[in-house]
């Protein structure tokens, strides 16, 4: 037995075991990341894996198929919401098969189940929505009655505000499946998150990225969040080094809007926060009626947000403004 292996074995016997890790002030054994098995989810998990490996940790992946991945014939709003993408990963954490779960933050329910915690939010990728089309270079170029694919109620109401004449059809599946359906001619255009396309090296498929003033993103869009069991305090402390504090605060404000509105994927709600030059945080929010029986409501609010309490208060204020303006 070589000296490093012997030292590791002695440390494994000498120090308490937490999940798949051994602690003596530093991590000596494997951190297991629970992840969905889509190409984008694996990229996200591998990104976190690389960041942790750069810090000297040994990391492996546990691939899982979630209920949300299996149900493709119905919209998420009709079968339980985006939380269907995280339940199996949370079970792996609860059972000790994994130590952390990496999520697209916009898929994470606003209130986590008891016993779980959001350990950190990483630096955000492009939060914008993107128009993808093989035929048309912009939303304005789409012909009357063009078929646009999306299953997001938020995108439905925002697209209708931009182009009430287009026909919006459901679009489910992972990113590659959605692009394949477009390429097969089922849609004239589809709307996807720019972040996923960029992460997979598919930025060339973007015909135009909508500016937030045109199509407001979903809360947390473009950001990655890491979920852990709430009792893993040593692991939470370790993961703080991956956090981007500014993006964590801004996405916290966005999620506070959705939480205050009772938000889920069954609510056509958008929220996006941006830091201003003077250090204040501006949040824009929008709500629309998916049946088209009420006008699109847009509001914004601005305040200092030096901590999570202030960020959440800003988001809650924006939700109040939405309700006062007629959002339900």
Image: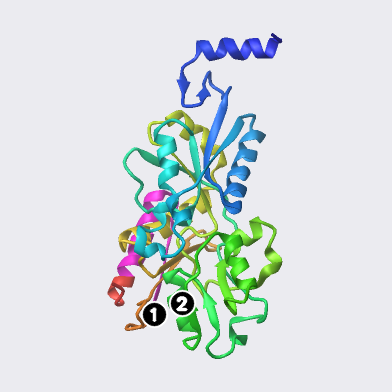
Q: Is residue 283 left or right of residue 61?
A: left
Q: Which residue is mark 2?
A: 158
Residue 300 drawn in magenta: yes
Q: Residue 187, image x and y in percent?
A: 57, 77
Q: Is residue 36 visible?
A: yes
The residue sitting at 33% across, 66% down in the picture is: 319
Q: Is residue 126 visible?
A: no
Residues in magenta, as a range:
297-321
Task: Name the one closer to the observer, 234 or 14.
Answer: 14
Q: Is residue 147 above or below residue 40?
A: below
The N terminus lies in quadrant: top right
The residue sitting at 61% across, 61% down in the picture is: 176
Q: Is residue 263 above or below residue 5?
A: below
Q: Residue 106, image x and y in percent?
A: 46, 57
Report crowding for label 1: few under 14, some 14 to 19, many 20 or more residues within 10 A (C-alpha).
some
Q: Is residue 195 above or below residue 58?
A: below
Q: Is residue 13 left or right of residue 76?
A: right
The C terminus lies in quadrant: bottom left
User: Which tag, 2 or 1, sits closer to the chain's start?
Assistant: 2
Image quarter of residue 243? top right
Image quarter of residue 47? top right
Q: Secondary structure at mark 1?
A: loop
* Marking on residue 296: 1
Q: Are marks 2 and 1 in contact (CB under 8 Å)?
A: yes
């Amino acid at each position: 037995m070589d000296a490093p292996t012997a030292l590791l074995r002695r440390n494994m016997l000498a120090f308490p075991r937490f999940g798949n890790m051994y602690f003596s002030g530093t991590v000596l054994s494997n951190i297991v990341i629970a992840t969905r098995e889509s190409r984008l989810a694996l990229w996200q998990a591998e990104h976190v894996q690389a960041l942790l490996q750069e810090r000297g940790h040994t990391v492996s992946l546990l691939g899982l198929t979630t209920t949300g991945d299996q149900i493709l014939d119905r919209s998420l709003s009709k079968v339980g919401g985006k939380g269907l993408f995280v339940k199996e990963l949370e079970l792996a954490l609860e059972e000790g098969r994994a130590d952390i779960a990496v999520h697209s933050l916009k898929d994470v329910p606003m209130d986590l189940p008891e016993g779980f915690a959001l350990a950190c939010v990483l630096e955000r990728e492009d939060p914008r929505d993107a128009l993808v089309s093989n035929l048309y270079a912009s939303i304005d170029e789409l012909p009357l009655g063009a078929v646009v694919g999306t299953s997001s109620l938020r995108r439905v109401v925002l697209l209708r505000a931009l182009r009430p004449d287009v026909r919006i059809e459901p679009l489910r599946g992972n990113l590659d499946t959605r692009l394949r359906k477009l390429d097969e001619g089922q849609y004239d255009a589809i709307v996807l998150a720019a972040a996923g396309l960029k992460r997979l090296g598919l930025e060339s498929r973007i015909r135009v990225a909508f500016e937030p003033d045109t199509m407001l993103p979903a809360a947390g869009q473009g950001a990655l969040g890491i979920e852990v069991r709430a009792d893993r305090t040593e692991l939470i402390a370790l993961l703080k080094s991956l956090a981007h504090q500014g993006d964590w605060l801004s996405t916290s404000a966005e999620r506070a809007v959705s939480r205050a509105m009772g938000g889920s994927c069954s609510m056509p709600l958008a929220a996006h926060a941006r830091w201003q030059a003077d250090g204040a945080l501006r949040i824009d929010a929008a709500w629309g009626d998916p049946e088209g029986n009420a006008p699109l409501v847009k509001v914004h609010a601005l305040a200092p947000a030096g901590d999570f309490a202030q960020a959440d208060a800003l988001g809650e204020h924006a939700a109040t403004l939405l309700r006062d303006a007629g959002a339900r």
